[in-house]
Amino acid sequence: EFAKLRGVRVLPEFDAPAHVGNGWQFGEKEGKGKLAVCVNKEPWQDFCVEPPCGQLNPVNPHVYTTLGKLYQDFFELFETDMFHMGGDEVNLNCWNSTEEIQEALRRQGKTGTEEELLELWKNFQDQAAEKVYAAAGKKLPLILWTNSLTEKGQVEKFLSNQEYIIQIWTTGQDAVIKELIDKDFKVIFSNYDAWYFDCGYSSWVGEGNNWCSPYKGWQIVYENSPKEMYRSQGGNPARESLILGGEAAMWAEQVDGAAVIHKLWPRASALGERLWTDPESSQTWKQAEIRMINHRNRLVERGIEADALQPEWCNQNEGLCYTKKN
């Protein structure tokens, strides 16, 4: 309600079948079997992208009835005309090393090849989607992240462009961008090489920097144009309407309520101008710099703890803070 009164729509994402585990252990106590598998399994590197591990059990029918109830709760809380189903970082080895899933595959004469596991994932996705439609009381667009189902040459085997919007998290040079749009999929850009705001900090599972370093400064955010990325791959301008927009991602491994504001702002303002006005390629961050510095100061005056971009001296002496010209 707070967001709605301010013209902001909150779009929920219920990530599945991965990124789950703890909290789903109640299934066995209630006679519903294992709702999640590989929960907290070690060594975690073999069963998930980051700890703690856990994925929904696609061969347990109680998973789908439970999802249906959770989706109903979501639609009671959020007014939305689309639903984000996640689909991020599914680890096929988790399923393929789970005895219950192996047995289900053997009964079907399958051995757990990659193709068979992708089909198992598709079957999960189809059943979960039906639960979303039932909870919403209608069929509505579904969003998935780019993943193994959307890889080059195979997206149409698993997903329908009439049902799914694909959110792109891979780099702005990924050939899947053009493939998805040329195959009539609507897309949302969140390419990590420009719009992942959690990049550039220290690693939290070892030493050195985190996986998507370096830090994405506002200049990179500003110049990241979805249309230009598609055009650079030889895209058809007539299909650019399939680019619905973009989203900056601030994943929560290294951010909490004490740090989120200054990590988001003022970089998110650069994202806003890119998506709302989409400046021509001839207009670079340099033309926007003075406005950006002034806007950062305006945010601070309004009580938003936006991160500093330059020394105050630079703001007082426009044009004198620059790198050496060749």
Image (cartoon, rainbow, N blue to C red):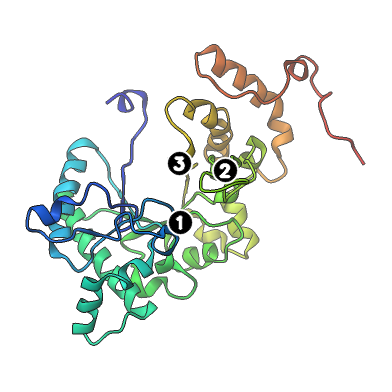
Disc 2 marks a residue whose amino acid type is Cys
Residue appearing at x 12%, y 57% in the figure: 28
In-front residue for pair 51/226: 51
Q: Position of residue 250 (x, y in %)?
A: 48, 39
Asked if labels 1 and 3 touch by Cβ distance under 8 angstroms, the answer is: no
Disc 1 marks a residue whose amino acid type is Leu
Outermost residue toward the front in this view: 42
Instruction: Classify residue 65 as left or right of residue 193.
Output: left
Outermost residue toward the top in this view: 301
For the residues carrying marks 3 and 2, which lies nearer the camera in this image?
3
Instruction: Classify residue 246 as left or right of residue 70.
Output: right
Dot 3: element: helix
Residue position for label 1: 242
Residue position for label 3: 253
Disc 3 marks a residue whose amino acid type is Glu
State which tag comes first along the sequence, 3 or 1.
1
Residue appearing at x 57%, y 28% in the figure: 266
Question: In which quadrant of the rendered image does the C terminus lie?
Answer: top right
